[in-house]
Amino acid sequence: MKFWQRFLEFYVNASIHVAFGVLALTQVTILTFDIHGDEHLAWFIFFGTIACYNFIKYGVEAKKYIIVATPYQKNIQIVSYIAIVLGLYHGYFLSTYVWTGILLLLFLTGLYAVPVLPRAKNLRNLGGLKIFIVALVWAGTTVVLPFVNINYTITWDVWVETFQRFLFVLILLVPFEIRDLKFDDPALKTLPQRFGVANTKVIGAFMVIVFFFATMLKDTVSTGEICMKGVLFLGLGALMYVTKRHQSKYFASFWVEGIPILWWGGLCLLDLVV
């Protein structure tokens, strides 16, 4: 039991779980639009997510990324370096257009983590902007990049899906914002700090409604997509209801981050049934 507890803790803390979530959302886009998937792009996104998230969490200061204090952090550092090498290998096969998109997203990620403004340590410290940057990067990575990779025209339906993905990530971030309320600096001006926990959950519930009904704005939408997003509508609504300020250890970092994987699994199941 202790082994599995340590494994789960490392799996979450080394950003492997969140990387599977981002990979899952990429596959959701491929299945939703029935487009050609590129394994190199998928694995680049997976390994790139591990490296980027670990850099943001543990290595914003260069010395912390190179010189670590404990064997546990050393193991996470090794995973990060392996992820960088494997990510660059898969990145070698990507087109110049895809790399242009990747560099733009990396630029946003860098602004999130690295000090760029005189009165804010970085953009994550610029009042309330943190979650919007995260949602924008996730949406761009998991929706726009797969289409750029196949030189496909970004249609109206793709932009609608990008907007929905942006909202989806914002919704998933609500439990994290509420969980971290007791730790966050007041200068961050997160949603719970600005509006309180109850009102933040109401805002999250409103985003859930917009997320679902935005599906109807698409020119082409399948019955399977409506059904799947209907399930998400109910599940995300329930998530807003059950989210509390005092959460179990893995409520947000495992169960909430696992929702994209369940979405992917649901679409795969629908493909088998239909």
Image (tube, rainbow, N blue to C red):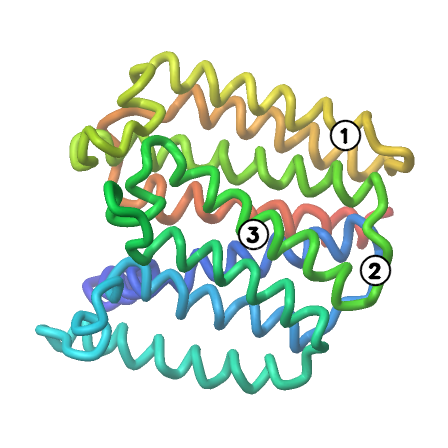
Q: Position of residue 30 (x, y in %)?
A: 75, 57
- Give residue 190's mark: none
**Camera-side residue of 106 and 158:** 106
**Which residue is depicted at the point 38% across and 49% down?**
254
**Camera-side residue of 119 and 180:** 119
Name the amino acid, label 3. Ile
Camera-nearest label, 3 or 1: 1
* Distance from Cα at disc 1 to Cα at disc 2: 18 Å
Q: Position of residue 54 (x, y in %)?
A: 33, 65
Camera-nearest label, 2 or 3: 2
Q: Which residue is mark 3?
A: 261
* Callout 3: SS: helix
* Callout 2: SS: loop
User: The N terminus is located in which quarter?
Assistant: bottom left
* Callout 1: SS: helix
Q: Quadrant of residue 151?
A: bottom right
Q: Position of residue 153 (x, y in %)?
A: 86, 55
Please tell me which of labels 3 and 1 falls first in the chain: 1
Name the amino acid, label 1. Thr
**Which residue is depicted at the point 48% across and 70% down?**
48
Q: Quadrant of residue 79?
A: bottom left
* Distance from Cα at disc 3 to Cα at disc 1: 20 Å
* Distance from Cα at disc 2 to Cα at disc 3: 19 Å
Graded by Cα atoms within 10 Å as few (under 14), some (14 to 19) or many (20 or more), the crowding at tag 1 reads: many
Q: Which residue is mark 1?
A: 215
Name the amino acid, label 2. Ile
Would you say 165 lies left or right of 4 here? right
Please tell me which of labels 1 and 2 falls first in the chain: 2
- Eyeballing the image, is 88 above or below 222? below
- Eyeballing the image, is 138 above or below 96? above
Q: Which residue is mark 2?
A: 35
